Amino acid sequence: MLARQLTIEELASEIPDGSKVALPPDYAYCALSAVRALIRQQKRDLHLVGVPSLGFQADMLIGAGCVATVETAAVTLSEYGLAPRFTAAVKSGSITMMDATCPAIHAALQASEKGIPFIPLRGLIGSDILKNRKDWKVGNNPFADEKDDPIVFLPALKPDVALIHAPIGDKFGNVWVGVRREQMLMAHAAKTTYVTVEEIVEGNIMEDLQLKAAAIPGIYINAIAEAKNGAWPVGIPGGYDSDHQHLKGYVELAQTAEGFDKYLNEHIYNSKAEAAE
Amino acid sequence: MLARQLTIEELASEIPDGSKVALPPDYAYCALSAVRALIRQQKRDLHLVGVPSLGFQADMLIGAGCVATVETAAVTLSEYGLAPRFTAAVKSGSITMMDATCPAIHAALQASEKGIPFIPLRGLIGSDILKNRKDWKVGNNPFADEKDDPIVFLPALKPDVALIHAPIGDKFGNVWVGVRREQMLMAHAAKTTYVTVEEIVEGNIMEDLQLKAAAIPGIYINAIAEAKNGAWPVGIPGGYDSDHQHLKGYVELAQTAEGFDKYLNEHIYNSKAEAAE
Amino acid sequence: MSTVLLEEILINAISKNLDGLGHIAVGASSPIPGAAALLARARSNGSMRVSILGSEDNNFFSDGGKEIFDIAGQGRMDAFFLSGAQIDGKANVNLVAVGDYNHPKARFPGSFGSGYLYFVVPRVILFRLEHTPRTLVKEVDFISAPGFSDDDVYRPGGPYKLITDRCLFRVNKQKKCFELESVHPGHTVNEILEQTGFEFLLPDNEVPETETPDEATLKVIRGEVAREISEIYPSFASRVFGIK
Amino acid sequence: MSTVLLEEILINAISKNLDGLGHIAVGASSPIPGAAALLARARSNGSMRVSILGSEDNNFFSDGGKEIFDIAGQGRMDAFFLSGAQIDGKANVNLVAVGDYNHPKARFPGSFGSGYLYFVVPRVILFRLEHTPRTLVKEVDFISAPGFSDDDVYRPGGPYKLITDRCLFRVNKQKKCFELESVHPGHTVNEILEQTGFEFLLPDNEVPETETPDEATLKVIRGEVAREISEIYPSFASRVFGIK
């Protein structure tokens, strides 16, 4: 069965305002070209889910006013320092934070993947993460011997959209993610999955047993778009490195709202070449 | 870190009587040469766990008197008919059955993999599977709106041993399983994992990104043994086919206890060549 | 028109219940349901996926044995097939034992995924190609999966049709029982009444005969469907379609 | 003997707490703990595994982002490292915010895996290379992960040591607080008392000086450890060891 193959702009246009959008961290495969299209299309009220953390793409979306809520274990630009638009938004109260811990996000996505309404998880008890998550509950382990055994119950986390990038996909929508299997978990857990790939290859990925073992089958993929260097300015593992100078420049500009607007105008809004792809 | 590399007999000797041993179905990678060694070493009181079902290896172990308990979604020889020694053992009451349904076994292993004491699962309510599993409980979905939402709670299933076969391993104990990832789940969930492989290859599997994405890392593997044609008489996917004539002959002989003893004597006890491997 | 085989009538009848669906999954030992799914896919204009356990050509799963159940739990499996050593009038399915569970007269392989999939897959089509009072019983000896559930039980899925070598039943969800839908050519309602161990509803009007596939459909069944099914069920394909 | 750097003293001191363990995991932004783990592995005679987040050479995980947490939950991770914007005398760690959580004065990336790993990894070694009353506080503003738990809470893991740029504390599990173990060369107990925002125990005897690595150890640190750590932390390896 053939996949729907779209342009980046078409793909982004299928993600409505208010969507709960799951995104991977910078060290995985980030669909930055699609994120820029979301910004160009002035999406609003997105609820970002970091799987399990977020980086540059979240800082840009937040700075551009696309985001209402951030659910994540962290927003980090690692060696580039604090995420400036994220930090400013939290301080000003313009976004709602749902702080989590990494394994809680993985586990809650696994609950959605399995079609179970919740999953228990150890840890968290006594933390202010738990105290601030009104959507989580503390229950008792039903298999505890005599005394109580409190344990956190996490409701299934079902994003409306998983938005990911990958090195290769095929015309059937099969997408190779290698060891970055949290991207597979995202696709299994989310209602819809949109993928950009460096290259749409000939043939069927699932006919190569080695590739198949690390590929998301097309049944989970709502649409695919080809995006050469689609993670830029972030890199992709096993592919190209991050654009260090560009990212450093971003962080410098994004320290202020004005600087960030300058970045937006220069690299996103006025990126006609990209918009026309 | 180098893996412990053993002979098949040494490997089998590390699995004590009474162990809870997880085994894959015939269509995955079955460590038949190690199973024959278990039979030669006259193991007793094994608790077999089918992940999620069992085939020839279970029928042989049951026939040889090695098994006390069978926990599985099925014991099947597929086109070869009913599993004769299994059927006889159930009828005579010589083994304890813990009937399950496939996803319950996967989910309970995932609970062990995640270090959580239990996992909820849909389905099962109103079945006699549930009625006969005193170790399972029915609880309430803590996130249900107003009315009750009964759901089954499965305790984590933590086998003492996962015993599996694979096409290739390396001297670091890394083992490639391809799409047969339930074998990876078994290794994650079990206390110890013993693996036989068709071939111990040169180099480090984890240095090949494609192989790594479908390989069990050595940290989970307690020992590895090389066993060329180690799944025989069952086949391995992508490798060799089942030995159809041999399996047909087995099923014919195993219809009676006497016939099965003949098979044991001919192909297992007296398999000096194999024992000396 | 060449002689139409029972298998072809069954494949055609099952396939009619799959049109318009997105993903049909077929379990082990199910050559006729597998062929029916492939037939439905052949006329879907590329809008249907079929996954067949044990197939390499028609099995896209890449996350281990759990994925087929997870995908059903996610609501991404629209139809599945179940058989049973016994099936009763409440659509309960028994894949485990005849007689007392702890000292059975007969023991079968086990429940496989039935205790789960029957709850979550919207259209579960039951098939039993031995239609006798021994197999279609008043009450199963062991419930691998119940046909119906109390209102408070999460159950987006359940039984949809029951097809045998003699007839096709539809499921009446209100009355929680089977209703005769059609009788295969050469069989009669009286014979069905006689050979069925459970009670079932009869329609108000005359019971129609199960449709025989037309020439175009037969061509697809005997062509691409036969070729594809022979990958997984070579002996079935050889016996029924002469493919080797 | 060549001049020994503070980093080398820290690497050596941390590594002493890892000997004999089977699997050490190192998280993000942790060059000194990473080097300490590699040093401990170098003298383990091949009995220790080290996994380093972000490394390709020292990262054997093949089941996605969840595996490092699953492996800790299974009891297969013996030691891990945590830092904090603030750490208090109850070993609570804050990686989130200073001031009111909803209107913070400062906001940091977030809790990452701390809210879980601190509970299940037997030896969690805290490190904070700015030892001032601003970072080592009486009470953290936000608990990403609590230092100690009530008896009924499942907690096989927890804090083991706290190392700073001035000293090494051990954890006193009975009294649920820190106890000064050693002071780094060039620092004094009085300075530690002055620069620590929380109360801690002093040993009955004199506080020893943190050991300086011997020549053989320095050779390993500056040789294979420096080379291996430069894969993940090139700027650290260049600054400290002159590797490029």
Image: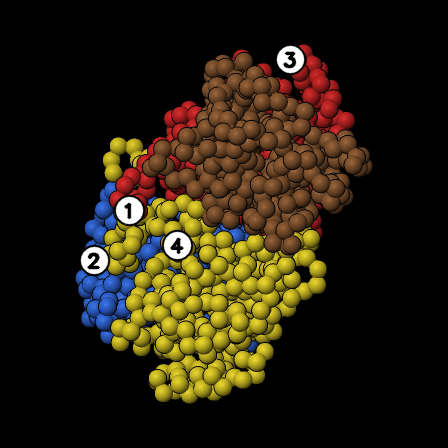
Chain colours: A red, B yellow, C blue, D brown
The subunit letter for the residue under badge 3 reads A
Label 1: element kind: loop
Q: Nearer the viewer, residue B248 or C203?
A: B248
Residue ID at (25%, 38%): B148
**Residues flagged by tags 2 and 3 on a common chain:** no
Q: Can you identify the residue that label 3 sits on?
A: A257
**Residues flagged by tags 4 and 2 on a common chain:** no
- Is D52 displayed left or right of C33 in the figure? right
Of labels 4 and 1, the one closer to you: 1
Q: Which mark is residue B157?
A: 4
| Extreme residue toward the front, this view | D205
Label 4: how many Cα within 10 Å (few below 14, some 14–19, many 20+): many
Residue ID at (24%, 43%): C151
Q: Which mark is residue A145?
A: 1
Q: Quadrant of residue C114?
A: bottom left
Q: Amino acid at mark 3?
A: Ala
The subunit letter for the residue under badge 4 reads B
Q: Can you identify the residue that label 2 sits on?
A: C201
Residue C149 in the image, given as x and y percentages of width and height: 25, 49
Residue B193 in the image, given as x and y percentages of width and height: 50, 60
Of labels 1 and 2, the one closer to you: 1
Residue ID at (49%, 24%): D200
Say whether residue B223 is visible: yes
Q: Amino acid at mark 1?
A: Asp
Q: Amino acid at mark 4?
A: Leu
Label 2: element kind: loop
**Residues flagged by tags 4 and 3 on a common chain:** no
Label 4: element kind: loop
Label 3: element kind: helix
The answer to whether C105 is drawn above or below residue D26 in the figure is: below
